[in-house]
Image: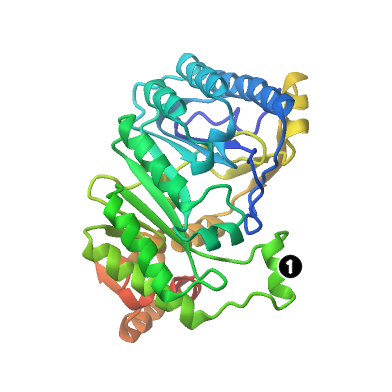
Amino acid sequence: MNSAAAHNSDAVRHLYVHFPFCARICPYCAFYKTRGNSADFAAFCDALAIEAKYAAERISLKLETIFWGGGTPTVLSTEQLASLLRLFAQTFDLRRVSEWTIEANPGSVSAKKAAVLRHGGITRISLGIQSWEDDLLYLLGREHNARQAEESFRIFREAGFENIGIDLMFALPGQTEAQWRASLERTIVLEPEHISTYCLTYEEDTEFLARFERGEFHAEDDTEARFFQIAMSMLETAGYKHYEISNYARPGFYSRHNEAYWRGADYIGLGPSAFSTRGNERWQNIEDHREYARRLSAGESPTASIEKLTRAMKRAEQIALGLRSYHGVPANLVAASNTNDLVEAGFVAYRNGRVVLTHAGKLVADSVAEELL
């Protein structure tokens, strides 16, 4: 099996695994996902085992973070998850791993599954609640209701997890300001260590985009900005640090894995559709779980495409991603004239030799990044 990563000797410290299966397909989601069946689940687990062992043998790894995302990893059975956890413990050197995250949906959580995850090495839960309003959950195509969402959070707490994040969405069709405030308040009461708030975007190849183009849904910049300001105010008042545009955390609970992405660290991705970046090379696995499984079982590479990253491309990514973080970007990476204009306009500030977004700048982060490119 050939791989784009085989010739680079620098150790990689971050690993992502994409689980492509969901119990239900959400109409707003653009990530690669499918419902699958028991045979698909089993074939995926077998293929992932092959790819994991191949990565461990051929790539220099000193893993510090692991992230199991999707899709919905917890849609797999308790036994399948336990088997994959054992596989990772046997395949990779996990002694340096300080954070191992799994994404979970409330509809696929049980006390037994939570216990298996806890004892298997998972240290951090990213719980996709999205809303505490049952009518909005129905609109989003979620399989859970608000009661199940809170029960799932408590199941993970009772299993011993001390690092739980809750994901929420805002600017949803029909969502009121009162509903958004109530969702934030209910989340704060639970005292999770981490909270992510994502503004709904209408992505290509989704049902929501089709409905948006038909005029059924509308996006209003003023509404999005107001909801974003509400989140910043309420969560910062509650003691959460706004450490990235969409992410807030208690001190010591920033997502180390995601911070690695934002600062441009190398990472390896396993699973169908997963990306990897190493040095000046980026590659992606095929976006087809059955072909992914077939290739690996046949000793073939799952890689579908490889991209060479130029210095200009890496600089653009460093600015776009770094600016979203509270770390900002090195001042010498951007033109002083453009930066000074943005400082005067109140969108960025200089701090310890770096350029960081101000409160006003966070509201127009993408536009500020474009000016600095």
Relative depth, front residue between 292 and 1: 292
Which amino acid type is shown beneath numbered disc 1? Ala
Relative depth, front residue between 227 and 154: 154
Image x and y of residue 248, in percent? 33, 56
Image x and y of residue 121, in percent? 39, 24
In the rendered view, does 46 fall on the left or right side of 92? Answer: right
Instruction: Say which quarter of the image contains residue 335.
Output: bottom left
**Could you tell me which residue is drawn at 60 percent across and 44 percent down?**
282
Image x and y of residue 157, in percent? 32, 36
Residue furthest to the top: 90
Res. 362 visible in picture: no
**Could you tell me which residue is drawn at 49 percent across and 25 percent down?**
60
Label 1: how many residues lie within 10 Å, few (<14), some (14-19) or many (20+)? Answer: some
Q: Secondary structure at mark 1?
A: helix
In the rendered view, does 352 fall on the left or right side of 196? Answer: left
Q: Say above or below: 340 vs 102.
A: below
Instruction: Say which quarter of the image contains residue 117.
Output: top left
**Could you tell me which residue is drawn at 58 percent across and 77 percent down?**
219
Relative depth, front residue between 227 and 315: 227
Image x and y of residue 227, in percent? 41, 73
Res. 181 visible in picture: yes
**Residue under label 1:** 210
